[in-house]
Image: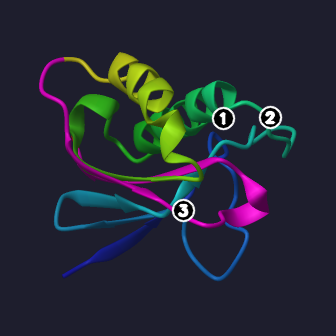
Amino acid sequence: MNKTVIASDKSPAAIGPYSQAIEVNGFIYTSGIIGVDPKTGEAKNSIEEQTKQVFDNMKGLLGDAGSSMNQVVKTTVFIKNMDDFGKVNEIYASYFDGAFPARSCVEVARLPKDLLIEVEAIAIKG
């Protein structure tokens, strides 16, 4: 089994001892992706802006890994406030065509950098 580290400047750099993503056996496993602009290191304040940034970051990371949003098979969404579920869903849906990935969504007490959302994904390469 070959394991390949994926790194991209289209998604925020790791802020700890982990990789942005790992490819193994034709699958790409991302770490939690946050809504920080990878160029500036800054995050907007609203759940809508952070959610859009998360999925823009995911799209860039998967693209650099040889995959795409349409190859995502599973996501896990961590949100600070379950009252934002509807807003997140609306934006989430706009990033996928056709069949949506399997998904879990949980409310959490706190996220890195006190952000409002973090998403991890599993995608097929290719």
How would you rate the neighbour count of disc 2 (Cα within 10 Å): few for under 14, some for 14-19, many for 20 or more?
few
Q: Which residues are magenta?
A: 98-125
Instruction: Determine the image quadrant of residue 94.
Output: top left
Q: Is residue 24 visible?
A: yes
- Indicate left or right for 46 with 94 as reference: right
The residue positioned farthest toward the left in the image shown: 99
7 in the magenta segment: no
Number of marks in the image?
3
Local secondary structure at mark 2? loop
Which residue is more in the foreground, 27 or 97?
A: 97
The residue at which mark 3 appears reads as 20
Q: Label 1: which residue?
A: 50
Q: Where residue 22 sits: x, y (%)?
A: 39, 67
Can residue 116 be found in the magenta stretch?
yes
Q: Nearer the viewer, residue 78 or 60?
A: 78
Q: Secondary structure at mark 3?
A: loop
Residue 62 located left or right of residue 24: right
* Crowding at mark 3 (Cα within 10 Å: few <14, some 14-19, many 20+): many
Residue 66 point in image, percent of width and height? 34, 42
| Three-letter code, disc 2 | Asn
- Residue at the image position 54 percent from the left and 70 percent from the top: 19
Q: Earlier in the sequence, mark 2 or mark 1?
A: 2
Residue sticking out furthest to the front? 83
Left or right, 81 with reference to 26: right
**Residue that badge 2 annotates:** 45
Name above or below for residue 33 compared with residue 60. Answer: below
Q: How is the image coloured?
A: rainbow
